Structure formats: C-alpha cells, structure tokens
Image (spheres, rainbow, N blue to C red):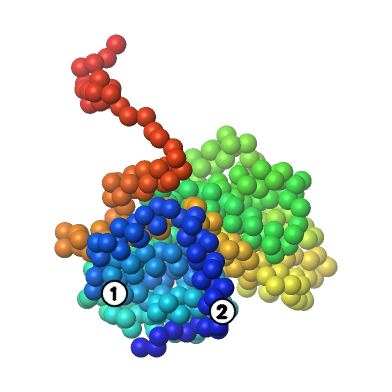
Amino acid sequence: MKDYMVKDINLAEGGEKRIEWAGGRMPVLSQIRDRYEREKPLENVNVVACLHVTVETANLILALRAGGAKIALTAANPLSTQDDVAAALASAGIKTYAFRGESDEDYYKCLNDALELNPDILLDDGGDTITAVHAAEKTQKIKGACEETTTGVIRHRARAKENKLAFPLIAVNDAETKMMFDNRYGTGQSTIHGVMNATNILLAGKVVVVAGYGWCGRGVALRAKGLGSNVVVVEINPRKALEAVMDGYRVMPMLEAAKIGDLFITATGDTSVIRGEHIALMQEGAILANTGHFNVEIKVNDLEELAVEKKEIKENVVEYRMKDGRKLYLLSEGRIVNLAAAYGHPPEVMDMSFANQALCVRYIVEHYEELRNEVYSVPKNIDEEVARLKLKSLGVEVEVLTEEQQKYLSSWDLGT
C-alpha cells in the first residue's frame, strides 16, 4: 500500500500552519481529541475517510488518530482538496490520496488506494466509498459507516430500503448540530464566498435564484439577502415553498426564474435542476453555480450543446457564448462552488459536524454488534453533548429546570 498520493509533499509546512489555525477555532473537536488521546477508544480500528481534504477535515483525522485509529484519507470531490493540507497529513504519517484537479480516473484510483487499508469503519461525504465497497463485495469486515452530506444519505436510504445495505450507517448529516448549523450557516457563507472569489461581482441589487430551500438553500438565500440581493427561490416541496414566501422571498418555477436571474445557485441534491430549456431563457451575463455535492444539478452537457463558443475567463469561470450572442458563465465546472472556489465551511461550524463524526465512530466501535444494517440517526445524547460542549466553549450557560417544572412537563393531571 502506497503511503500517499499528493500534489507536492513540499507544501506540508504551509498546510501544518493552516491546520493549527483552524484547530484553534474548533474547541469541541479539540476536547474530544484530548479525551481520545487519554482513552484510546479506537485502538486497532482501521478508518477509511472519503471527505473534502480541508484544514477542518485534517483536525478530525488527527483526533481519530489520537484515539488510536489507523487512517487512510481520500478526497470526496476532484476540486475540493487543499493541496497543502494533503501534503501536511501525508507528512504526518496519514495515508493520504488526494490532489486538486483529479480526473475521474485519478479520483477512483485514489479512492481504491485508500480502501487497501481494509477498513473497519468508513467515513463518507457523498457515498462514493460506500458504493465502491458494495460494488466490489468487500463489506464483510466493515462494522459501520458515517455519512456527512444530504446527497449521500439519500443514496444510502435508497439502498437500505431495498435491503442492500451491508452494514449499519449513521446519518451524521441529519444531526441537528450538523444540519441546522453546518448546512445553513456554513453552506450559506462559504457558497457566497466561492461566488465572490470566482467573480468579484456586486450582489447588492442582483436577482439571485436559489434552487432548493432545505437547510443549505436557506443559508444561501439568507446570506444573499443580507448582501442586498433580490432573492428568488425555486422549490418543489409545498411546505418549504410556503416557508420561503413567509421568509420574504419570491417563489416561482425555474422556467420563470430563468428569465430574470442574474446569479443562479443550485442547492437541491438532485439532478438536472438547470437544463437546456432554462438556459435558453437566461439573460446576458447570467452566472451559474452549484453548491450541491455532485456536479449534476446544472446540466453542463446542455450548456455545451447550446453554446457556439467556450472559453476560460479565469480560474473557476468559463464563458459560454450562445448562438444569439448571449454570454453565460459557469463557475467551477458546475462542481461544489464553496470548496472549488473558496475554502469551504468555516472551522467554527465544522467543529460541530466533525465532533459528531468523531463521537459516532466511537459509538459504532462500541455498539456495532447491536445494530442492524439500516440508516440510523445520530444518537440524541451525542447530538446534545456536541451542543453542550459548543455552548461551553462560547461561555454560554442555559437555564436548568426546577423540580416543579420537571414534574409539570412529565405529568398529565396538572392543567388549568
């Protein structure tokens, strides 16, 4: 098994400094790392992680190693790897197989190299590694897995529904201390950061079309609104669409939004959200970006077929000229813009997401024999522990129920 495959191992020193900087802003994960260092709950456990290789991920990997785990890390997206971080982890003895700009062939080679560790536990972001071990029928040794993102959870629930999931899986994405904070505040800020990095456009006064009003879409809409944009939401779910209306946004189908949008951001986890019939209606200068996990939300093939000319304007910005002379712009190849064109989520919010991951890995090690081959929610005590630790790190105290209040809430005979 090769020790690593990274862009340039000489980038390690810069990566180490950035990992340390992020670690200083991840107090919950730091407390867990200190605990794991003492208790070694993951001794002799092999973990293969397919995650975005960022400074925040690096701190999770180091926390798991502190707990005794042997780890191999590969990238969850061809454009999300921070090469200095990959080099730093490889230099620290972590088997790391990731570099920015991987081809499809490179991506799956790195993934399969990581799987040579013969994992007991998988950490996935999008589901590719879990899909790979099922396809190769190499699931016998695996005790369980954790899934980090909405798209992956959708895939695993579909597999479990058909009784084709070969081991228990914890949907870390669905923990309240992940979904409500990482997906909303993390995706909201980092997506706008990615768009700004790539284009430097003024968002004030622009019509920003957000496709999807789940936690990620809410976050993007909130941040765009805060910068003075006129936000339009495209949503298929009536309840979420109604919520968007109540939050002050216009809601309409994509065929209508396509005519007025200046910037389009997809955040649905589904395929072909922006298609040829929408592209045909877009106005001159419209910008298309995706913040969903896979590069399927914007139908890039349709854009290619409709264009008569294509050229790269700068890194992460490609111009497409239509037959009628309109110019449209695609960011980061339609891939996850907040990681391809920016740094991804801030460490303060990934602190909670990765604290859930670290605690759920331990939970699987200690409880896998009791679990069925199903998709599980994060245990409530873990979710609440992460919230308590985060509040403590912020110096925030919460109210405590009195005995009278506890009795009132647990009784049926105390009314008017």
Q: Name the residue under label 1.
A: 46
Residue 18 appears in the figure: yes
Q: Which of 337 and 405 is in front in this view?
A: 405
Q: Which amino acid does label 2 sit on?
A: Leu
* Discs 2, 1 touching: Cβ within 8 Å: no
Q: What residue type is labelled 1?
A: Asn
Is disc 2 surrounded by few (<14), some (14 to 19) or many (20+) residues within 10 Å? some
The answer to whether residue 211 is above or below residue 388 is below
Q: Is mark 1 on a helix, strand or loop?
A: strand
* Inter-mark Cα distance, 2 to 1: 27 Å
Going by the picture, which residue comes out furthest to the right? 325
Task: Say left or right for 77 vs 254.
Answer: left
Task: Kindly identify the residue that appears in the image at 44 percent across and 37 percent down.
Answer: 396
The quarter of the picture where residue 364 lies is bottom left
Task: Say left or right for 44 vs 172.
Answer: left
Indicate the position of residue 191 as horizontal and vertical percent values. Answer: 60, 57
Task: Say left or right for 9 vs 34.
Answer: right
Quarter of the image with the C terminus is: top left
Indicate the position of residue 340 as horizontal and vertical percent values. Answer: 60, 68
Q: Is mark 2 on a helix, strand or loop?
A: helix
Task: Kindly identify the residue that appears in the image at 63 percent across and 40 percent down.
Answer: 249
Indicate the position of residue 155 as horizontal and vertical percent values. Answer: 39, 64
Q: Nearer the viewer, residue 15 or 132?
A: 15
Mark 2 or 1, nearer chain start: 2
Task: Kindly identify the residue that appears in the image at 30 percent across and 63 percent down.
Answer: 37
Going by the picture, which residue comes out furthest to the top? 416
The answer to whether residue 292 is above or below residue 114 is above
Which disc is residue 248 wearing? none
Q: Name the residue under label 2.
A: 11
